[in-house]
Image: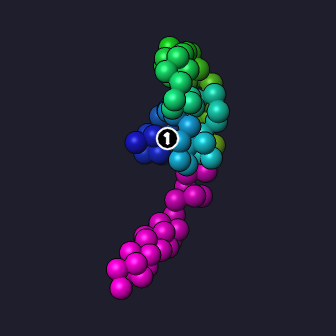
Amino acid sequence: MALEAAAFNLPVFGTNVGIMGELFPQEVLADPNNEEEIISLIRSFVPLAKNIDVSAIKERIFESYTVESSAKEVGKIYDSVLSNSL
């Protein structure tokens, strides 16, 4: 949901898992295994949100997630599943 929110110019925060660490600045990410860090991020997010450059995040999302790249990834998954089932 963070990707979708950023695509609509909404500031987002989350945990540093998966693609999040590549697309979002570290100041809006918390360690998923650190409860105190997550709580701290939530508490500090409102003032922090005003300074987040959502347009840069949005640009990285649109560069990383094109229809073509998504289709290639889905194709790789299908190929993998089919080759393992035969």
Point out residue 4 in the picture as x, y percentages from the top left corner. 43, 45
Vertical order, 26 against 48 (above or below): below
Q: Inspect the magenta stretch and tell me whether residue 83 lies in it.
A: yes
Identify the residue at horizontal 36%, vertical 85% (top origin). Answer: 86
Q: Inspect the magenta stretch and tell me whether residue 10 lies in it.
A: no
Identify the magenta region: 59-86
Point out residue 22 in the picture as x, y percentages from the top left corner. 62, 47
Identify the residue at horizontal 60%, vertical 42% (top origin). Answer: 21
Point out residue 72 in the picture as x, y percentages from the top left corner. 49, 73
What amino acid is at disc 1?
Ala
Instruction: Please name whichever residue, 64 or 80, is drawn nearer the observer in this view of the structure.
Output: 80
Q: Can you tell which quarter of the image residue 52 is in?
A: top right
Q: Is residue 2 visible?
A: yes
Identify the residue at horizontal 56%, vertical 30% (top origin). Answer: 31
* Residue sitting at the far left: 85
Vertical order, 52 against 69 (above or below): above
The secondary structure that dominates the magenta segment is: helix
Q: Can you tell which quarter of the image residue 64 is in?
A: bottom right
Instruction: Please name whichever residue, 28 or 52, is drawn nearer the observer in this view of the structure.
Output: 28
Point out residue 71 in the picture as x, y percentages from the top left corner. 45, 71
Instruction: Please name whichever residue, 69 or 40, is drawn nearer the observer in this view of the structure.
Output: 40
Q: Secondary structure at mark 1?
A: helix
Q: Which residue is mark 1?
A: 6
Vertical order, 3 against 42 (above or below): below
Q: Is residue 57 visible?
A: no
Vertical order, 53 against 47 (above or below): below
Identify the residue at horizontal 64%, vertical 36% (top origin). Answer: 25
Of the 4 image quadrants, the one containing the N terminus is top left
